[in-house]
Image (cartoon, rainbow, N blue to C red):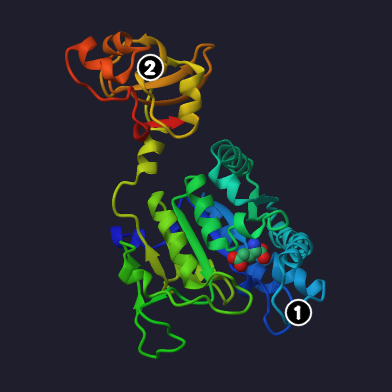
Amino acid sequence: MSATTAQHSIVTAKRLVVKIGSALLIDSATGALRRDWLNTVADDIMACRTQGQEVVIVSSGAIAIGRERLGLKGRALRLEEKQAAAATGQIQLAHAFEEAMARHGITVAQVLLTLEDTEERRRHLNARSTITQLLALKAAPIINENDTVGTQEIRFGDNDRLAARVAVMISADTLLLLSDIDGLYDSDPRKNPNATHIAEVRTLDTRIEAMAGAAPTGYSSGGMVTKLQGAKIALAGGCRMAIANGQANHPLRRLIDGERCTWFLPNSEPRSARKRWIAGALNPVGAIIIDPGAEAALGKGRSLLPAGVTAIKGSFERGDPVTIETNAGRVLGRGLSAYSNKDAARIAGHKTGEIHQLLGYRGRDEMIHRDDLVLD
Ligand code: GLU
C-alpha cells in the first residue's frame, strides 16, 4: 500500500472511533431503528476486530428514538423534553447495539459522557482509563453524550465534537464520521449540482470552513459545521478524520473497497502527539520532587517552576526525561527537565528571578515547561 493510500484508508487504523449519526440509525419515514443496517455495521466492526483493530463507537440517536416512543413528534423540543427523550431512547439504543454485536459474540459497554468529562483533567483521565480498560477486555464501548444531565450551556449537543474529543482523549489514530453525505464539497451539493467533492484536507483554514453550510434540519443536529469543528479537535490531537456516507449497508467495508470520502490529515507534529511520546516512549533517568503548591499548579496546566521543587533524585542532563513526584513519593507525571540534576538542585526552592545569580547563566524560567510535561 502506498503512503497516500495508507493515509486514505481505515484499514491502517490501529484504534478507530466510528461516529454514527442519528439520520443513519433512524428511518426518517417510519421513525424505526434500522436494525438490518446496524447488523451490517456490527459485521464490519467484527471484521476490523479480526484484523486486530480496536473499535470504539460513538452513537447518536437517543433523542430521536426517545421522542418517537414518548409521542413527542412534529415540533422542536424543549430542553427537558429532549432530556426525557434521551433517557427513554438511550436504553433502546444500547439494547439495539447489544443485539447487533452479540451476533458476533461481542460484549458492548455503555459510556455516557458530559462535556466536563472530556475537559476536566481528572475526569478526562478517568474516562480515558475506563475506555482503554474496556478495549483491553475486548468489550466494544458504545459512547453517547449524557444528555439527561446536560443543560444547554454545558452540553456538546452534537456527537461530531464529542467523538473528536473522545478520539483525542483515548489517543485514537483515526476518527470516522458516518454521515448522510460522502464528505466535504466546495459548496452545498444539494443546492449546487456543480459542487466539487474534496478528497483531502490538510489545513482547516477559513476557505475550508466557508465550505460548510448551515446545519440541516431533521434528526441530525450537527451538519458540516460541527463536523469541521470535530476535524479541528481531531487534527490538533494528531488524529486523522474521515467524513463518509454511511447510509448503505456495510458502510466500513464500502470505504475499504474504495468508496470516496473526505480525509482530514494532521500535517505537523501536534503537541499532544509529543506529549504522548513523553508519556509513553521514554525511560525516566531521575526524579524531581515537588511541594503541594506546585502540584496544584501543575493540575491547572501550569509549568513547573524551581520555587516548587523540594529535592532532586538521580543523575540527568538538560532535556532528559524525569518523573515528577510528591514528597511522599507519589508519581504525578513525567517531563523533560530544562536543567541537569546538579543545576536543578542548586535552583530548587528558589524564585525564577534568582536563577541567573545562582547558576551564572540565564536558563529557562521553568524547571519543566508545560509543553514538556505530562501528568499521569
Ligand atoms: N446525543 C444525541 C442523541 O443521542 C445526538 C447528538 C447528535 O445528533 O449529534 O440523541
The residue singled out by tag 2 in the image is: 307
Q: Position of residue 222 (x, y in %)?
A: 54, 69
- Taking 230 as reference, is 195 left or right? left
Q: Which quarter of the picture shows residue 371?
A: top left
Which sits in the foreground, 274 or 252? Answer: 274
Q: How far apart in space, not on screen, are marks 2 and 1 (Cα)?
A: 61 Å
Residue 326 higher or lower than 275, as above or below: above
Can residue 2 be seen from the camera position used here? no
Q: Which residue is at 62% across, 74% downward?
A: 23
Q: Which residue is at 64% across, 56% downward?
A: 145
Q: Position of residue 209 (x, y in %)?
A: 37, 69
Q: Which residue is at 59% across, 74% downward?
A: 249
- Taking 154 as reference, is 283 left or right? left
Q: Given this view, does label 2 or label 1 mark the residue nearer the observer?
A: 2
Q: Which part of the image, by quadrant, shows the N terminus?
A: bottom left
Q: Where's ligand 1: which quadrant?
A: bottom right
Badge 1 local density, few (<14 within 10 Å), some, or many (20+)?
few
Amino acid on which disc 2 is placed: Ala
Badge 2 local density, few (<14 within 10 Å), some, or many (20+)?
some
Residue 73: mark: 1
